[in-house]
Image (cartoon, grey):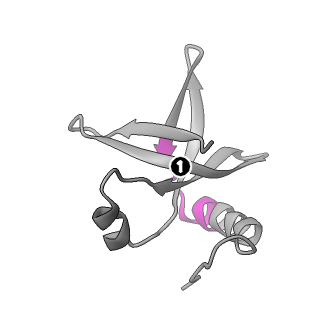
Amino acid sequence: NPDIVTLTDDEGKEYSFEVLDAIETDMGRYLALLPTYDDPKKMLEDSGELVIVKVGEEDGEEYFYEIEDDDEYETIADAFIDRLEDYFEIDNK
């Protein structure tokens, strides 16, 4: 069964993602996510881009946030691409 997480944006809109992979480094823990859709047409229209988030913890609760540092993002994205390219067709441009 896929591991599905639901994220809520600042406006309260919810989005569902399948967790494809997780990496833990000395910089932190990260997840590679792929959007999921109830409507197959929306799935076909999606760009298929991975969403990469950093995992944080506050008061014992896990939360996900955007990676703001470009170098950190590139390092983690490259690591996920190396790990996932055997399983998925990845356009690394």
Q: Is residue 23 left or right of residue 16?
A: right
Q: Is residue 86 left or right of residue 13?
A: right
Q: Residue at x 52, y 52 (%)?
A: 67
- Magenta span has 64? no
Where in the figure is residue 88, as x and y percent of width and height? 64, 72
Q: Residue at x 42, y 37 (%)?
A: 6
Q: Quadrant of the N terminus?
A: top right
Residue 57: which quarter of the image?
top right
- In this orientation, which residue lies closer to the viewer: 28 or 63? 63
- Which residue occupies the extreme top position in the image? 59
- Which residue occupies the extreme left position in the image? 11
Residue 89: which quarter of the image?
bottom right
Q: Is residue 11 left or right of residue 71?
A: left
Element marked by disc 1: strand
Per the rendered image, the range of residues in magenta is: 65-74
- In this orientation, which residue lies closer to the viewer: 66 or 86? 86
Q: Quadrant of the C terminus?
A: bottom right
Where in the figure is residue 27, as x and y percent of width and height? 72, 47
Residue indicated by mark 1: 18
Q: Residues within 10 Å of mark 1 (few under 14, many from 20)?
A: some
Q: Residue at x 29, y 63 (%)?
A: 42
Q: How many marks?
A: 1
- Magenta span has 70? yes
| Residue type (three-letter) at the residue carrying disc 1 | Glu
Vertical order, 21 against 13 (above or below): below
Q: Residue at x 36, y 71 (%)?
A: 44
Where in the figure is residue 17, as x and y percent of width and height? 47, 48
Where in the figure is residue 19, as x and y percent of width and height? 59, 48
Vertical order, 39 against 44 (above or below): above
